[in-house]
Image (cartoon, helix red, strand yellow):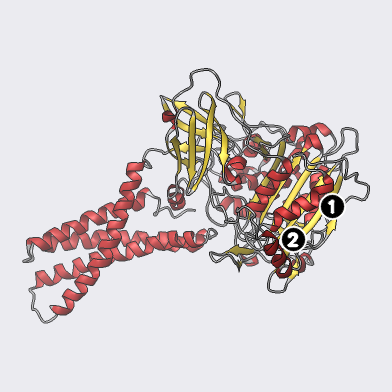
Amino acid sequence: MSVKIITYLKGDKKMNKKFIVILLISIIAFSGISVQTTFADDLETSLEETPSGIPFSKLEKTIDEYVANYIGKTTPGAAVGIVKDGKIVFLKGYGYADIEKQIPVDPKNTVFEWASTSKLFTWASIMQLVEQNKLDLNVDIKKYLPVEFAQKLEYNQPITMRDIMNHSAGFGDYAFNTIVFSPEQVVSLEEAILRDKPKQYYEVGTASSYSNYTASLAGYIVQNISDIPYEDYVRENIFNTLSMKNTSAYPIFDDNKKMKDEKAMGYIPDQKGGFTPGKWSYVSHLPAGAINGTLEDFSKFAIALTPKDDEELTLFENKNTINTMLSPSYDLDGEMVGTAHGFFQYTTEKPSFGHGGNTAAFSSQFAVVPEERFGIVILTNAYLEMNILFGLQDLILGNQIDEATVPDIELPSTSEVEGKYVPMERQEGNFVDFAKYISLYEIKSEGPNKITMNIGPYEGTYLQTEPYHYEIIEDKIPLFRNAYPVLRFRIEDDDVKQIIVGNGMDLSSLPSGRTVPFLTGSIIILIVNILFFTILPIILLISLIKGRKKKLDSFNKRYKLYYYLLVLFGTVTIINNLIPPAKIMISTFHTFTAMKPHIILNYPLFLGTLVTLILSTKYLYKARVSNKTKLLHFATIVLLVLLFVLLFHWNFFAITG
């Protein structure tokens, strides 16, 4: 599934004089680099060209040269498909589907995880039902849900299917259960939706916040209206219709067991330039990212979305349905922004629509250019691969940065938009909320009408072309031009409240209780507590050993006992609450069930801390202790109070996911 990508894998270096030598070594090391190529038999390659202007006669050479820069560096294998005028005109595999077994990628047979590009089949299913007058995009979705099920959803604001397709239904993200690594952990779609509920925290229709959850909800509506399981619906109404025989929406291939034998291994790039085998992803939220299939099959879907005006359609009855689906649908303050009925609109030479996706060890990218009857599909077996996905799509579709110009009018000062921002799809109401604040997006003024946006170590430069409207003019990685091509700043009471991007990528100013001073204070409190409750137990243990023969009266004994317990509760609390974030930092994908014991343990730890705090303080006044001991005691209490306030504030006591 996709998740907003802020990590960019290395490998975007220019070719140098050693390229020929490197290429020869690559060919030897990766004997499967050029496995199988398919071209349409009757294609006039000398007359056709890509939307970016590459002649089809040079298409294979161009793609080969580009992909050669990254195969074996950012991904072990890749499959690239291009369709034009109703035909697959290019279909080729590169590198390995399985490094250990030296199995090359076969574009017709190698099965990949399609991740969040699976959502496109959910949106197509929705539009089929719209065409059949079984669904209205503009009415409350509760109309299409069983009454008892709808009551369990617990969302306050009514939402429409259009809101869902625009990722503007008011929901934040949900960190858990999106992907599991065992077939036994897969649950039904209904159970997944009712179990994994994010918080609806912003006003519906006012922002675009990427949501796997609402995509699943859309698929459940398809299931309820059609009265058959979602995975059966897409198989019968899309896969079978398009002869996609090597594609399955069943998370464990219940309908096509042989696909498992053809599935590629997934990999995670390591710090040494190699690859670590990853795990296959199993997705209970089927409509959001469960599809597995081959490049050839996915290319057939691209053909189905780019028909002639007068030809018989496959997926729909009327061409207007496709035209509607592939048109902007997210209207914010009278301006159409990005999203097109679930498809993302890219800023390419000609209007293009598609989606990207990532699972734990696979990445994908899909786009069609309706005006050209053109499409591109790219599948890789590596986590968060972007060089081939975005870079090759840009090369073929022509997503080059145009020269933006400043109008001859006075524009607002760039200093007005400076500051730190956080994605709208944060984990509101969940302890993982902290993760979005670790690496904030930063806008810096670079002089009149020019700003930069920094995401970690990466930077894009923008120019103001209208009041509070900035266009990308420079980036060194394809992330900015694909995900953040235009930044629109929404001003309220003379302050920036939101950066409107569309495509589920909107950002907001830091909410109250999450401002920079508070975040800085939180970090300081956490660090001081960690140091204090790590070092103090060691000091107390040494003191206990040294003074074990020293006789104490009953009050001093009891004070020491309860104070030592108080410190122990502080140490255990620190350790208990560092484990979940540490797990999340190591691996993105976890179940809430695995994290819940740590959350539940905070309750007895808090109660134990409170009891020992009271008892230790009680005996402090009865024992004969030094002023230094009293000062240490009260410092311990202050730090513990701050620690638990911090834990409550960051939802470390929220026992529901």
Q: Which residue is mark 1?
A: 240
| Corner quadrant of residue 123 | top right
> Looking at the picture, which amino acid does disc 1 mark?
Asn
On screen, 367 above or below 331?
A: below
Residue at 61% in and 58% down:
383
Mark 2 residue element: strand
Q: Which mark is residue 430?
A: none
Residue 273 x, y percent position in the rendering: 58, 65
Say which of 486 and 310 sits in front: 486
Q: Are marks 1 and 2 in contact (CB under 8 Å)?
A: no
Residue 94 x, y percent position in the rendering: 74, 61
Q: Is residue 498 visible?
A: yes
Camera-side mark, 1 or 2: 2
329 horizontally vs 428: left or right:
right
Residue at 43% in and 47% down:
437
On screen, 569 above or below 480?
A: below
| Corner quadrant of residue 162 | top right
484 horizontally vs 412: left or right:
right
Say which of 63 and 437 sits in front: 63
Count of marks overlaid on the render: 2
Q: Which residue is mark 2?
A: 94
Mark 1 nearby-residue class (10 Å; few <14, some 14–19, many ≥20):
few
> Looking at the picture, which amino acid does disc 2 mark?
Tyr
